[in-house]
Image (cartoon, rainbow, N blue to C red):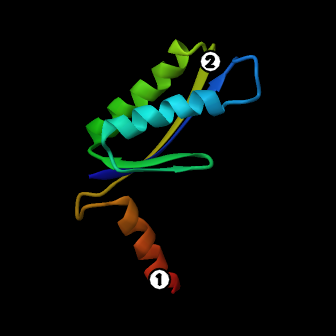
Amino acid sequence: MAVAEITVVPLGTGTPSLSHYLAELEKIVSESGLPSELHAMGTNVEGSLEEIMALTKRLHFRLFQLGALRVSTTLKIDERMDKQLTLRGKVEAVRRKTG
């Protein structure tokens, strides 16, 4: 299991407002069935590396289908072989250290 942060930004849309595009991407993330958390600068997801890569590719190319002339995608992946990672577990580990 891996966790990832995905940020996909449409460029060349002719408008500074991106919420319409990002709402479409959030639907794809939700329909993927992967645990996810939308935040102000992207989306965190957990799943197998293959699932995360496939989802990222779908998100990236969906923006072209919606008319973006250019798409910038940033993907950060955290994967461990010694134990299972979850979004919740990563946050709880930090809170245990600070709390």
Image quarter for residue 91? bottom left
SS label for mark 1:
helix
Looking at the image, which is closer to me, 57 or 83?
Answer: 57
The disc, 1 or 2, on the residue closer to the chain's N-terminal end is 2
Image quarter for residue 86? bottom left
Where does the image place residue 10, in percent across and percent down from the top left? 62, 25
Judge from the rendering whether residue 44 lies leftward or rightward of residue 3; answer left or right: right
Residue lying at the far bottom in this picture: please name it: 99
Amino acid on which the number 2 mark rests in the picture = Arg
Amino acid on which the number 1 mark rests in the picture = Lys
Q: Residue at x 49, y 31 (%)?
A: 25
Residue with the mark numbered 1:
97
Q: Which residue is drawn at 44% across and 82% down?
A: 96
Where does the image place residue 2, in percent across and percent down from the top left? 32, 51
Looking at the image, which is closer to me, 72 or 40?
Answer: 40
Residue with the mark numbered 2:
70
